[in-house]
Amino acid sequence: MRTAFFHDERCFWHGGGNYALTLPVGGFVQPGGGLPENPETKRRLVNLLRVSGLMAEIDAGSGAEASREDLLRVHPVSYLDAFKAASDAGGGELGLRTPFGPGGYEIAALSAGLTKAATFAVLEGRARNAYALSRPPGHHCLPDWPNGFCLMNNIAVAIRAAQAAGLARRFAVVDWDVHHGNGTEAVFLDDPEVLTISLHQEWNYPLDTGSARVRGVEGSNINIPLPPGTGEESYLEAWDRIVAPALARHRPEAIIIACGFDASAMDPLGRMLLRAESFRRLTRRAMHAAETLCHDRLILTHEGGYSEVHVPFCGHAVLEELSGSTIRVPDPLGDTIGARQPTMRWIDETSRYLADLAREFAL
């Protein structure tokens, strides 16, 4: 079996709204630039996979839109109806920083459908592992309120669909997007069968979520807020010291990674110091956990990441590792980011903080 890769050009056509970075245009905010969540980071990843030859080594395809039944397992009918009506009327914005144009509802359902397709491909034994290049992203979307570029909760829709189909019950979601996965946390906070873990920059976005004190039912939620400037070694230590033991304790039937690349040192919306090799090494750890705990059942779905230049190299490194390919595309920014890593004094301080968190979580 090979790595499956799900993507669709229609997802790259999602858009709408008049923004400059994350600010609505108007008053003293001059038009220009648009939202950082734009199609080019994803389209350029697809292009790089084709140019490098890696696309020929993986099973690439699309998927169907998530059905109304799929969506209703996560989102209430009132939200879906309001979203569909606004979409049919030409677009709009229902939450915070979630603009969409005509057909936005269908594109968001397709994005959730790609994550569902990747999940089912792995659980049904048709793929070794899988990556869904979903857009719009999903991990900030609450059941009844979209925010942070997220219009439907792609991972939650996929998990609930898999549970309904009898493919698996116990899941673990590890979110290494630089922003807290508040939507996924909210959906599963009272569900002990789904462990949610979020590694994120502390108080980045949202400003009022992501505290390590939020534990969920039976400790089924783990937040690892990291200080701005955290580098590769501390991310890997956070995995080894907290994520890996938590996964082993939960014993999931499948692991889903909310794969954001906005912890890249080049990202405009994060202040972390990761490079392509960092994401490769995190992926290697995720693969080891899946091999040890759940028969290699590993799914990654794309979340944030807003550097058009750097995201493709980070994503390519992840897919190199997932597929076991010998193709290598060097990170042109890797040496520069490597030279900017924190000093040992900073790493040691973060290590003490992570040790304290691990004790709090009884890991």
Image (cartoon, grey):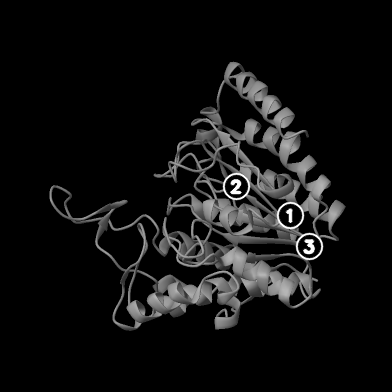
**Residue 115 percent coordinates (x, y):** 61, 69
Label at residue 297:
3
- Which residue in the structure is indicated by mark 1? 192
Position of 34 with respect to 263 (left or right) is: left
* Residue most extreme to the left: 27
What amino acid is labelled 3 in the image? Answer: Arg
268 relative to 163 in the view: left or right: left
Residue at x 81%, y 71% (from the top left corner): 1
Q: Would residue 53 be visible to someone looking at this image?
A: no
CA distance for labels 2 and 3: 18 Å
Q: Is residue 235 above or below residue 307?
A: above
* Type of amino acid under label 1: Pro
Crowd tier of the residue under label 3, counting other residues whose Cα lies within 10 Å: few below 14, some 14–19, many 20 or above: many
**SS under mark 1:** loop
Position of 336 with respect to 149 (left or right) is: right
Tell me which numbered mark, 2 or 3, is placed earlier along the sequence: 2
Question: Does label 1 or label 3 sit earlier along the sequence?
Answer: 1
Dot 3 falls on a residue whose secondary structure is loop
Q: Amino acid at mark 2?
A: Trp
Counting every numbered tag in the picture gives: 3
Q: Residues within 10 Å of mark 2 (few under 14, many from 20)?
A: many
Instruction: Choose mark 1 or mark 3, whichever is in front.
Output: 1
Location of residue 350 by image quarter: top right
Q: Which residue is rendered at x = 36% and y = 57% of the image? A: 96
Q: Quadrant of residue 121?
A: bottom right
Write down the residue under mark 2.
Answer: 176
Q: Please tell me which of labels 1 and 2 falls first in the chain.
A: 2
State the image coordinates of residue 181 (x, y, percent, origin top left): 55, 51
